Amino acid sequence: MEEQATKGSRSEAVRALTRGLAILRHINVSGETRPGEIARALEIPRPTVYRLLETLEEAGYVVMSPTSNRVRVTRLAASLGDGYALTSELCQASGPVFSEYGAKIVWPLDLSVYNNGTMVIQETTHGRSPLSIDRGMTGYKLPVLRTSAGRAYLAFCSEEERQFILDHLRRLGDPDDLPFLEPRFLSQMIEETCSRGIAIRSAGEFRKQTASIAVPVMFDGRILACVSMIWIRSAMDVKRAIAEFGNPLHQVAQRIAETLSD
Protein backbone atom coordinates (compact mmCIF):
# COMPACT_ATOMS: atom_id res chain seq x y z
CA MET A 1 0.00 0.00 0.00
CA GLU A 2 2.78 2.40 0.94
CA GLU A 3 4.63 1.66 -2.30
CA GLN A 4 1.47 2.29 -4.32
CA ALA A 5 0.93 5.60 -2.52
CA THR A 6 4.52 6.62 -3.29
CA LYS A 7 4.13 5.77 -6.97
CA GLY A 8 0.85 7.66 -7.08
CA SER A 9 2.45 10.70 -5.49
CA ARG A 10 5.30 10.66 -8.00
CA SER A 11 2.85 10.28 -10.87
CA GLU A 12 0.88 13.31 -9.70
CA ALA A 13 4.08 15.34 -9.33
CA VAL A 14 5.21 14.44 -12.85
CA ARG A 15 1.76 15.28 -14.24
CA ALA A 16 1.77 18.68 -12.49
CA LEU A 17 5.25 19.43 -13.77
CA THR A 18 4.32 18.45 -17.33
CA ARG A 19 1.23 20.62 -17.23
CA GLY A 20 3.15 23.53 -15.73
CA LEU A 21 5.75 23.38 -18.50
CA ALA A 22 3.02 23.15 -21.14
CA ILE A 23 1.36 26.25 -19.69
CA LEU A 24 4.67 28.12 -19.65
CA ARG A 25 5.34 27.21 -23.30
CA HIS A 26 1.82 28.26 -24.30
CA ILE A 27 2.14 31.67 -22.63
CA ASN A 28 5.57 32.19 -24.16
CA VAL A 29 4.25 31.48 -27.66
CA SER A 30 1.10 33.55 -27.15
CA GLY A 31 2.90 36.56 -25.72
CA GLU A 32 0.10 37.05 -23.21
CA THR A 33 -3.15 35.21 -22.63
CA ARG A 34 -5.94 34.58 -20.13
CA PRO A 35 -6.25 31.51 -17.86
CA GLY A 36 -9.49 30.48 -19.56
CA GLU A 37 -7.80 30.53 -22.96
CA ILE A 38 -4.98 28.38 -21.57
CA ALA A 39 -7.48 25.89 -20.16
CA ARG A 40 -9.28 25.56 -23.50
CA ALA A 41 -6.12 25.38 -25.60
CA LEU A 42 -4.42 22.75 -23.44
CA GLU A 43 -7.59 20.96 -22.29
CA ILE A 44 -6.64 21.39 -18.63
CA PRO A 45 -9.35 22.12 -16.04
CA ARG A 46 -9.53 25.83 -15.27
CA PRO A 47 -9.00 25.40 -11.47
CA THR A 48 -5.84 23.42 -12.23
CA VAL A 49 -4.63 26.17 -14.58
CA TYR A 50 -5.14 28.81 -11.89
CA ARG A 51 -3.34 26.68 -9.31
CA LEU A 52 -0.36 26.09 -11.59
CA LEU A 53 -0.26 29.76 -12.59
CA GLU A 54 -0.10 30.73 -8.92
CA THR A 55 2.86 28.39 -8.48
CA LEU A 56 4.61 29.75 -11.59
CA GLU A 57 4.00 33.33 -10.46
CA GLU A 58 5.33 32.63 -6.98
CA ALA A 59 8.46 31.11 -8.54
CA GLY A 60 8.91 34.20 -10.70
CA TYR A 61 8.24 32.74 -14.15
CA VAL A 62 4.93 34.45 -14.99
CA VAL A 63 3.12 37.58 -13.93
CA MET A 64 -0.62 38.18 -13.87
CA SER A 65 -2.05 41.60 -14.70
CA PRO A 66 -4.42 42.67 -11.90
CA THR A 67 -6.55 44.70 -14.34
CA SER A 68 -6.79 42.63 -17.53
CA ASN A 69 -6.60 39.07 -16.14
CA ARG A 70 -3.86 38.39 -18.67
CA VAL A 71 -0.73 36.45 -17.85
CA ARG A 72 2.68 36.64 -19.50
CA VAL A 73 6.16 35.28 -18.91
CA THR A 74 8.77 37.27 -17.02
CA ARG A 75 12.36 37.96 -18.00
CA LEU A 76 13.35 35.05 -15.77
CA ALA A 77 11.29 32.62 -17.86
CA ALA A 78 12.34 34.22 -21.12
CA SER A 79 15.98 33.70 -20.19
CA LEU A 80 15.61 29.98 -19.45
CA GLY A 81 16.77 29.03 -22.91
CA ASP A 82 19.99 30.98 -22.71
CA GLY A 83 20.36 31.77 -19.00
CA TYR A 84 23.05 29.21 -18.25
CA ALA A 85 24.90 30.04 -21.46
CA LEU A 86 24.84 33.74 -20.60
CA THR A 87 26.04 33.10 -17.05
CA SER A 88 28.82 30.95 -18.43
CA GLU A 89 29.80 33.74 -20.85
CA LEU A 90 29.81 36.26 -18.02
CA CYS A 91 32.08 34.04 -15.94
CA GLN A 92 34.45 33.46 -18.86
CA ALA A 93 34.52 37.18 -19.60
CA SER A 94 35.07 38.23 -16.00
CA GLY A 95 37.82 35.73 -15.16
CA PRO A 96 40.72 37.43 -16.98
CA VAL A 97 39.44 40.90 -16.09
CA PHE A 98 39.20 39.97 -12.41
CA SER A 99 42.72 38.56 -12.51
CA GLU A 100 44.07 41.78 -14.01
CA TYR A 101 42.19 44.24 -11.81
CA GLY A 102 42.21 42.08 -8.70
CA ALA A 103 45.96 42.54 -8.45
CA LYS A 104 45.53 46.33 -8.67
CA ILE A 105 42.49 46.75 -6.45
CA VAL A 106 43.55 44.05 -3.94
CA TRP A 107 40.21 44.20 -2.08
CA PRO A 108 38.02 41.24 -3.17
CA LEU A 109 35.73 41.51 -6.19
CA ASP A 110 32.49 39.62 -6.87
CA LEU A 111 30.45 39.15 -10.03
CA SER A 112 26.83 38.39 -9.16
CA VAL A 113 23.59 37.87 -11.09
CA TYR A 114 19.99 38.20 -9.98
CA ASN A 115 18.09 34.95 -9.46
CA ASN A 116 14.70 34.54 -7.81
CA GLY A 117 14.98 37.10 -5.02
CA THR A 118 18.74 36.87 -4.45
CA MET A 119 22.03 37.96 -5.99
CA VAL A 120 24.14 34.87 -6.66
CA ILE A 121 27.93 35.18 -6.80
CA GLN A 122 29.25 33.62 -10.01
CA GLU A 123 32.88 34.72 -9.99
CA THR A 124 35.04 36.11 -7.19
CA THR A 125 38.57 37.01 -6.14
CA HIS A 126 37.92 36.28 -2.45
CA GLY A 127 40.13 33.21 -2.61
CA ARG A 128 43.04 35.22 -4.03
CA SER A 129 42.72 38.50 -2.15
CA PRO A 130 44.98 38.83 0.90
CA LEU A 131 42.42 41.30 2.30
CA SER A 132 39.44 38.94 2.16
CA ILE A 133 37.89 37.60 5.35
CA ASP A 134 35.73 35.14 3.37
CA ARG A 135 36.49 32.08 1.26
CA GLY A 136 34.45 29.85 -1.03
CA MET A 137 31.98 32.56 -2.04
CA THR A 138 31.10 31.21 -5.51
CA GLY A 139 27.41 30.28 -5.51
CA TYR A 140 26.75 32.24 -2.33
CA LYS A 141 23.34 33.95 -2.29
CA LEU A 142 23.19 37.57 -1.20
CA PRO A 143 20.10 39.52 -0.14
CA VAL A 144 18.98 42.06 -2.73
CA LEU A 145 17.98 44.98 -0.53
CA ARG A 146 20.87 44.82 1.92
CA THR A 147 23.84 44.50 -0.46
CA SER A 148 25.41 46.91 -2.91
CA ALA A 149 25.07 44.36 -5.74
CA GLY A 150 21.34 43.99 -5.15
CA ARG A 151 20.87 47.73 -4.87
CA ALA A 152 22.78 48.28 -8.10
CA TYR A 153 20.60 45.71 -9.83
CA LEU A 154 17.40 47.34 -8.57
CA ALA A 155 18.56 50.80 -9.61
CA PHE A 156 19.58 49.89 -13.15
CA CYS A 157 17.01 47.26 -14.15
CA SER A 158 13.78 48.27 -15.87
CA GLU A 159 10.93 49.72 -13.84
CA GLU A 160 8.82 46.68 -14.69
CA GLU A 161 11.44 44.22 -13.46
CA ARG A 162 12.11 46.32 -10.35
CA GLN A 163 8.46 46.24 -9.35
CA PHE A 164 8.32 42.50 -9.94
CA ILE A 165 11.40 41.94 -7.74
CA LEU A 166 10.08 44.18 -4.97
CA ASP A 167 6.68 42.47 -5.02
CA HIS A 168 8.43 39.11 -4.79
CA LEU A 169 10.54 40.27 -1.84
CA ARG A 170 7.43 41.58 -0.09
CA ARG A 171 5.77 38.18 -0.49
CA LEU A 172 8.86 36.45 0.93
CA GLY A 173 8.55 38.70 3.97
CA ASP A 174 12.08 38.51 5.38
CA PRO A 175 11.92 40.66 8.56
CA ASP A 176 15.44 41.98 7.88
CA ASP A 177 14.23 43.40 4.56
CA LEU A 178 11.26 45.34 5.90
CA PRO A 179 13.03 48.66 6.65
CA PHE A 180 14.50 48.64 3.14
CA LEU A 181 11.14 48.09 1.48
CA GLU A 182 9.87 51.44 2.71
CA PRO A 183 8.97 53.63 -0.32
CA ARG A 184 11.01 56.58 0.98
CA PHE A 185 14.16 54.49 1.36
CA LEU A 186 13.71 52.82 -2.03
CA SER A 187 13.15 56.03 -3.97
CA GLN A 188 16.11 57.76 -2.34
CA MET A 189 18.39 54.74 -2.77
CA ILE A 190 17.51 54.33 -6.45
CA GLU A 191 17.85 58.05 -7.19
CA GLU A 192 21.23 58.34 -5.46
CA THR A 193 22.55 55.11 -6.99
CA CYS A 194 21.59 56.18 -10.51
CA SER A 195 23.09 59.63 -9.93
CA ARG A 196 26.42 58.22 -8.64
CA GLY A 197 26.47 55.25 -10.98
CA ILE A 198 27.53 53.24 -7.92
CA ALA A 199 25.51 51.44 -5.24
CA ILE A 200 26.76 51.35 -1.65
CA ARG A 201 26.40 49.24 1.49
CA SER A 202 28.09 50.99 4.37
CA ALA A 203 25.91 50.85 7.49
CA GLY A 204 26.25 47.24 8.59
CA GLU A 205 23.00 46.23 6.86
CA PHE A 206 24.30 42.79 5.89
CA ARG A 207 27.70 41.92 7.33
CA LYS A 208 28.60 44.39 10.03
CA GLN A 209 32.36 44.09 9.64
CA THR A 210 32.38 44.85 5.91
CA ALA A 211 31.12 47.43 3.42
CA SER A 212 30.85 47.30 -0.35
CA ILE A 213 30.23 49.26 -3.53
CA ALA A 214 28.84 47.85 -6.79
CA VAL A 215 28.33 48.85 -10.41
CA PRO A 216 26.17 47.30 -13.14
CA VAL A 217 27.37 45.30 -16.12
CA MET A 218 25.23 46.76 -18.91
CA PHE A 219 24.76 45.17 -22.35
CA ASP A 220 22.39 46.42 -25.07
CA GLY A 221 20.78 48.78 -22.58
CA ARG A 222 19.96 46.16 -19.96
CA ILE A 223 21.68 45.00 -16.81
CA LEU A 224 23.17 41.50 -16.86
CA ALA A 225 25.16 41.38 -13.64
CA CYS A 226 26.87 43.47 -10.99
CA VAL A 227 30.50 43.85 -9.99
CA SER A 228 31.15 44.52 -6.30
CA MET A 229 34.18 45.40 -4.23
CA ILE A 230 34.13 44.44 -0.55
CA TRP A 231 36.31 45.91 2.17
CA ILE A 232 36.65 45.92 5.96
CA ARG A 233 34.62 48.87 7.25
CA SER A 234 37.26 50.00 9.71
CA ALA A 235 39.84 50.32 6.92
CA MET A 236 38.21 53.22 5.06
CA ASP A 237 34.96 55.10 4.66
CA VAL A 238 32.69 54.84 1.65
CA LYS A 239 33.64 58.28 0.31
CA ARG A 240 37.27 57.22 0.02
CA ALA A 241 36.29 53.86 -1.45
CA ILE A 242 34.30 55.54 -4.23
CA ALA A 243 37.04 58.08 -4.91
CA GLU A 244 39.79 55.45 -5.15
CA PHE A 245 37.98 52.46 -6.60
CA GLY A 246 34.84 53.74 -8.31
CA ASN A 247 36.45 54.27 -11.70
CA PRO A 248 38.41 50.97 -11.69
CA LEU A 249 35.19 49.14 -10.81
CA HIS A 250 33.40 50.77 -13.76
CA GLN A 251 36.32 49.76 -15.96
CA VAL A 252 35.95 46.13 -14.84
CA ALA A 253 32.22 46.16 -15.66
CA GLN A 254 32.83 47.81 -19.04
CA ARG A 255 35.59 45.36 -19.96
CA ILE A 256 33.29 42.43 -19.16
CA ALA A 257 30.51 43.90 -21.30
CA GLU A 258 32.92 44.56 -24.18
CA THR A 259 34.09 40.95 -24.08
CA LEU A 260 30.50 39.78 -24.43
CA SER A 261 30.07 41.88 -27.58
CA ASP A 262 33.20 40.50 -29.27
Image (cartoon, rainbow, N blue to C red):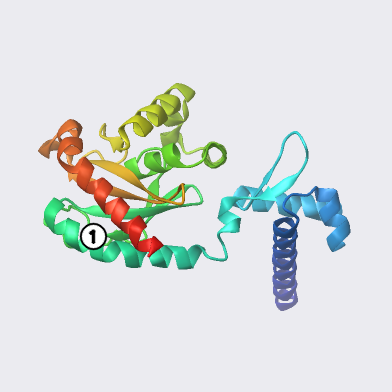
- Where residue 20 sits in the image (x, y, percent)? 71, 61
Instruction: Using the image, determine if residue 157 lies above or below residue 225.
Output: above
Residue type marked 1: Phe
Can I make out residue 256 in this image?
A: yes
Can I make out residue 131 in this image?
A: no
- Where residue 107 sits in the image (x, y, percent)? 16, 50
Instruction: Using the image, determine if residue 174 lies above or below residue 45.
Output: above
Comparing 147 with 225, the one in front is 225
Q: What residue sits right under mark 1 in the picture?
A: 98
Q: From the image, which quarter does the N terminus lie in?
A: bottom right
Residue at (46% x, 47% y) in the render: 221
Residue at (51% x, 51% y) in the render: 116
**Secondary structure type for disc 1:** helix
Comparing 209 with 229, the one in front is 229
Residue at (17% x, 36% y) in the render: 243
- Where residue 176 sits in the image (x, y, percent)? 41, 35
Compared across the picture, whether 220 is left or right of 214 comes to: right
Please tell me how crowded label 1 is: few (under 14), some (14-19), or many (20+) other residues with Cα within 10 Å: many
Comparing 228 with 218, the one in front is 218
Comparing 231 with 155, the one in front is 155
- Where residue 105 sits in the image (x, y, percent)? 15, 51
Which picture quadrant has residue 194? top left
Which picture quadrant has residue 167? top right
Residue at (32% x, 61% y) in the render: 138
- Looking at the image, which residue sits at the far top? 184
Compared across the picture, whether 74 is left or right of 238 comes to: right
Number of numbered callouts drawn? 1
